[in-house]
């Protein structure tokens, strides 16, 4: 009789951008329980309902076990040869730029690094983008415009140390629950702390709000222009900070005044009570320790970047930045959206946080990736962002697409058009863990990938903290790690020398070395430098404790807060205030489509539910898709609570049961984003949203659809 074995191991939750540490219990080779990792600085032992059900989502049922080529199961060698030979044929016939990759904020940093190096470095195509484009691309551009670099200045502790926390377009209670719990506890401990929630919907996050501003959707930039204008009028600017550390204030203020001169008109435009608005302005202006936390409600807009900068302008104007408990804090949706940004996993980035136009970047990366026999052929200009990429496929310009760990047939806007593009794409390669995602119907080659609890690597959460996700179980069947699959393809393409990794620690080491490669004089690159983590051997990599970048010889224990010295990554070191002229949504309301559509997450589900739907208790919260409607609109459009209704947009239809709720503003409806064809072909939110994007960030305006509502 064999003795039973039990042990525990630390890893990281694979869901939201909070990036909680998880302690997993393994009994006789099975992962039987999870609890919050008490040592992890993101959560100190807490987990939300999704995280605490992780062990219930495991098992081999529904997992992809073997590679498939043209619908036939094959061995790995055959599949890898097929990938390599078909990519080569298309590149030879159509050029390098006929090949593209679409990645995911669920991938580990090491997978992302290898993908970026393979596609941009050796396949020579700039067309590599990620579903993180749908999540935080506007926040990235906002930071770059203001700070000269995509650098999130704050830490989670700043939320706890703030005197005022402003949540804008963020239902923290549902979408980043552990961070919300931390904020709630901090507010209990500090009775002077105030919380303001700015959101068109009354959400669970309002439970701790001292003030709720239910603004008209899309009016955020005007609200913050109004704040800047009000601060100037009331003498609430930090003139010393503005003088020493910023540029562009006069232009930004002029634009704000032109747009939002008096409080009453701003309140009217935002559909808010003027007294409540002034209370917020007064609170913001009177406190130095203010954190404004913003998320998809700000980013998922055709003017999302401007909204981010309107917020950042107010922080710069008040000197509320680079201090404990202060700063504009974008929270990412996905577990490794930040890690993707680190390696260059966006189409506009080159590598290691460098853009194509970063002086000397192409030459530097070329030299870094050159081996004894191989010289990479980097593209010289950015590639297609997510929505553009699928338009290029539709036009026949991109003929080969490799999708990893995401389901664009559901999650991208204008889903019918995306599906049509995929159907006509000559080569679709899909790396996937499960058998029943909508995307597999379009796949010529299917590659079974390992999943959470099997994969080994790192992720970076919303506060720049790198944590280990650990491989605790063997992948089922013949599933393999994404980095391994790409390296095997690279070898078959003749690039083996540049992809000779045998373990993720080697990839991480290269990533860390590239981040610090020849960047001594470059302020922007120094912000992202993790060269202090280079040279870890396998044991040290495995034992790596969570740490916030930058990590350098000067900051070996990481960096909690950026810009404390008032030095920014712009050419002259000054932060930039950006003049903002607000724009409304591109999806216009009309007599035919009079309702504003908002889309988002629900508390207990994650993305397209490939994992969370496996835990029955997570389905209890909301068992089916729904349409949330204000009671007056229910009456006006003849729909009733719990009865079926249909939403119609210019892009498509969505059918589900109605939930009548006072939390909803009049004239607006809300639908969840999670349901896919696997559950119902009738209720995909992506079918309703058109592909309008922010011109600067390429992020779709997923929160501003225009729809008609009718009973079924
Ligand atoms: Fe996972 Fe996010 Fe929940 Fe933490 S808050 S347990 S990272 S889903």
Image (cartoon, rainbow, N blue to C red):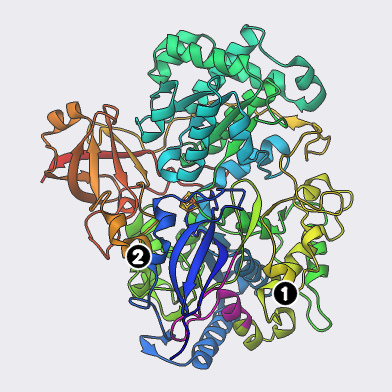
The residue drawn where x is 77% and y is 61% is 533
Q: Is residue 287 magenta?
A: no
Residue 693 seen in the figure: no
CA neighbours of label 2 inside 10 A, class few (<14), some (14 to 19), many (20+): some
Q: Which mark is residue 517?
A: none
* Residue on which disc 2 sits: 420
Q: Is mark 1 within 8 Å of ligand 1?
A: no
Query: Vertical placement of 374 versus 137: above or below?
Result: below
Q: Answer with mark 2 or mark 1, whichever residue precedes in sequence.
A: 2
Instruction: Work out which quarter of the rendered image holds the N terminus and state it.
Output: bottom left
Query: Vertical placement of 175 versus 309: above or below?
Result: below
* Residue on which disc 1 sits: 538
- Check disc 2 and report its element: helix, strand or loop: helix
Magenta-tinted stretch: 469-487
In the rendered structure, are the residues bearing label 2 and label 1 in contact, judged by CB atoms less than 8 Å apart? no
Q: Nearer the viewer, residue 519 or 11?
A: 11
- Check disc 1 and report its element: helix, strand or loop: helix
Q: Nearer the viewer, residue 5 or 696?
A: 5
**Where does the image place residue 8, in percent across and percent down from the top left?**
54, 68
**Where does the image place residue 9, in percent across and percent down from the top left?**
56, 67
The residue drawn where x is 25% and y is 53% is 620
Secondary structure mostly seen in the magenta stretch:
loop
**Where does the image place residue 45, in percent across and percent down from the top left?**
53, 50
Query: Vertical placement of 568 versus 368: above or below?
Result: above
Residue 695 seen in the figure: yes
């Amino acid at each position: 009789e064999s003795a039973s074995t039990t042990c525990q191991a630390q890893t990281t939750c694979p869901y939201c951008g909070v990036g909680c540490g998880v302690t997993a219990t393994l009994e006789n080779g099975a992962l039987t329980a999870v609890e919050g990792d008490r040592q992890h600085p993101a959560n100190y032992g807490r987990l939300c309902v999704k995280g605490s059900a992780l062990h219930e989502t495991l098992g081999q049922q529904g997992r992809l076990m073997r590679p498939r080529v043209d619908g036939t199961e094959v061995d790995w060698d055959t599949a890898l040869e097929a990938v390599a030979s078909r990519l080569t044929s298309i590149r030879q016939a159509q050029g390098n730029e006929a090949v593209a990759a679409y990645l995911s904020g669920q991938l580990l940093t090491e997978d992302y690094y290898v993908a970026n190096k393979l596609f941009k470095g050796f396949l020579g195509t700039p067309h590599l983008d990620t579903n993180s484009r749908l999540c935080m691309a506007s926040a990235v551009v906002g930071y770059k415009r203001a700070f000269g670099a995509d650098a999130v200045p704050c830490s989670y502790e700043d939320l706890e140390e703030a005197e005022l926390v402003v949540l804008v377009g963020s239902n923290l209670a549902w979408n980043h629950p552990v961070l919300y719990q931390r904020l709630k506890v901090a507010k209990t401990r500090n009775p002077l702390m105030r919380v303001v929630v700015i959101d068109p919907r009354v959400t669970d996050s309002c439970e701790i709000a001292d003030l709720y501003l239910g603004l008209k959707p899309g009016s955020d930039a005007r609200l913050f222009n109004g704040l800047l204008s009000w601060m100037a009028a009331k003498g609430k600017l930090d003139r010393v900070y503005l003088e020493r550390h910023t540029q562009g204030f006069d232009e930004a203020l002029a634009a704000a005044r032109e747009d939002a001169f008096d409080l009453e008109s701003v309140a009217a435009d935002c559909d808010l009570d003027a007294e409540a608005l002034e209370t917020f302005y007064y609170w913001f202006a009177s406190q130095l320790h203010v954190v404004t936390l913003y998320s998809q409600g700000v980013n998922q807009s055709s003017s999302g970047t401007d909204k981010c900068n309107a917020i950042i302008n107010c922080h710069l104007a008040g000197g509320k930045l680079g201090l404990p408990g202060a700063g504009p804090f974008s929270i990412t949706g996905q577990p490794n959206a930040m890690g993707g940004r680190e390696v260059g996993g966006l189409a506009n980035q080159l590598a290691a946080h460098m853009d194509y136009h970063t002086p000397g970047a192409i030459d530097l990366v070329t030299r870094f990736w050159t081996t004894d026999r191989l010289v990479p052929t980097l593209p010289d200009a950015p590639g297609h962002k997510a929505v553009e990429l699928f338009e290029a496929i539709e036009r026949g310009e991109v003929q080969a697409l490799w999708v990893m760990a995401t389901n664009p047939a559901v999650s991208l806007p204008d889903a019918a058009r995306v599906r049509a593009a995929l159907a006509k794409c000559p080569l679709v390669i899909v790396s996937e863990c499960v058998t029943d995602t909508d995307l597999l119907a379009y796949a010529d080659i299917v590659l079974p990938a390992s999943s959470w609890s099997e994969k080994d690597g790192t992720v970076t959460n919303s506060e720049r903290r790198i944590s280990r996700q650990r491989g605790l179980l063997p992948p089922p069947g013949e599933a393999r790690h994404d980095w391994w699959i790409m390296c095997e393809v690279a070898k078959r393409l003749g690039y083996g020398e540049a992809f000779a990794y045998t373990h993720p620690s080697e990839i991480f080491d290269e990533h860390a070395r590239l981040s610090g490669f020849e960047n001594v004089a470059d302020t922007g690159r120094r912000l992202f430098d993790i060269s202090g983590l280079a040279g870890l051997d396998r044991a040290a990599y495995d034992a790596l404790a969570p740490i916030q970048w930058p990590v350098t010889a000067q900051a070996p224990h990481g960096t909690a807060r950026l810009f404390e010295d008032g030095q920014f990554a712009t050419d002259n070191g000054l932060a930039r205030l950006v003049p903002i002229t607000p724009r409304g949504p591109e999806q216009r309301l009309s007599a035919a489509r009079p309702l504003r559509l908002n889309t988002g997450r629900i508390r207990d589900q994650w993305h397209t539910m490939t994992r969370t739907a496996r835990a029955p208790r997570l389905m209890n919260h909301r068992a089916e898709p729904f349409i949330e409607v204000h009671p007056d609109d229910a009456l006006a459009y003849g729909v009733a609570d719990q009865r079926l209704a249909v939403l119609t947009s210019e892009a498509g239809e969505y059918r589900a049961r109605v939930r009548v709720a006072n939390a909803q503003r009049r004239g607006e409806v809300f639908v969840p984003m999670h349901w896919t064809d696997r559950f119902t072909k009738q209720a995909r939110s992506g079918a309703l949203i058109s592909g309008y994007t922010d011109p600067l960030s390429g992020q779709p305006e997923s929160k501003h659809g225009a729809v008609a509502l009718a009973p079924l």
